[in-house]
Image (cartoon, rainbow, N blue to C red):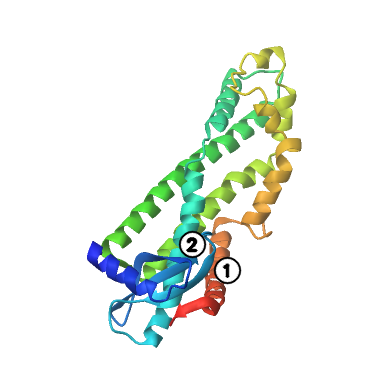
Amino acid sequence: MMNKSEQQRLLALGKKHKKFFEDVSINLDGYKVSGRLFYLARYTGKFRTKSKGDAVISLEKHTPEEAQRALLPLVSYFITWNNISDSIGERAQVDFSILEEVRDYLERIVNADIATIDIPVYKRSLSVIQSMLDLQKNMKQLWQEASQFDKHVKEKDYFTDSEIDQLIMYNIEGGWIQYAQLKDRYQHRRDFDVVYANRDKPDIKKYDRFSDKHTLYNMTSDCAAEQLRQNIDQMTDGKAPMDYDTYIDYFYNVYKERLKERVETLKKTLRYP
């Protein structure tokens, strides 16, 4: 791990490309070209966090061509880790206690095997909600793995091409989990219209232990369908339905291309090389 003295030297080097009324930050996840370590310096407005430019810097003697070769990997790691932190990290912290209440409610009714209702609808709804909860556990595990991965990179000060790919796969896997949480819920969205319609039947109402009286209503297709559809369209580039392999292959290739496009845009404000 880089010591304080090296960090200060790197920051001083980054400041050489700083303009008036700007702040500079150094991403300490480095990348090697020809055995030399390169880092990404980012420049933002002192009073606003809007990006003003970037620079590829190194404490070692190097050529501009070597610094140029480091740009795409450095930007790829920086952007992808931020995406993971903003999406997987935040999603892993989402409170699913309301869905747990729904799961428990459905489970009590299914176990009671009530003759006056369509039990298969309740069983299917229970399966959908349980799947969403199981996938949330997968999301938490993915976040833990990605965090450990990034910690390992920081300890050794640099990442490799294969580690960039691994980070990208974490990001795409997180997207798949979010999509998988919603796709069956949307497909069977009208099941909760039945569940809601039955809620006040005498042999059903006694199982209602919701902390929010509007929970079942909020699960109906009228309330949830449009938002589910919009989220699914956004998560799949409008290509749903998608199976796991199709999703991973598509977004791996698309993501890599978008990173290249982002780098081409960043080159317009690149301070060095």
Amino acid at the residue labelled 1:
Val
Where on the picture, by quarter, is residue 152?
bottom left
Residue 254: image tag: 1
Residue at 58% across, 35% down: 129
* Residue farthest along the front direction in this orientation: 20
Amino acid at the residue labelled 2:
Lys
| Above or below 69: residue 245 | above
Where on the picture, by quarter, is residue 241?
bottom right
In this rendering, position of residue 9 left or right of residue 242: left
Picture coordinates of residue 237, whole percent (x, y) = 65, 60
Where on the picture, by quarter, is residue 57?
bottom left
Where disc 1 sits, the SS reads helix
Of the 4 image quadrants, the one containing the N terminus is: bottom left
Residue at 65% across, 51% down: 232
Query: Within 10 Å of the Cα at label 1, are there few (<14), some (14-19), or many (20+) other Cα atoms?
Result: few
Residue 235 makes an appearance in the image? yes
Residue 46: image tag: 2
Residue 27: image tag: none
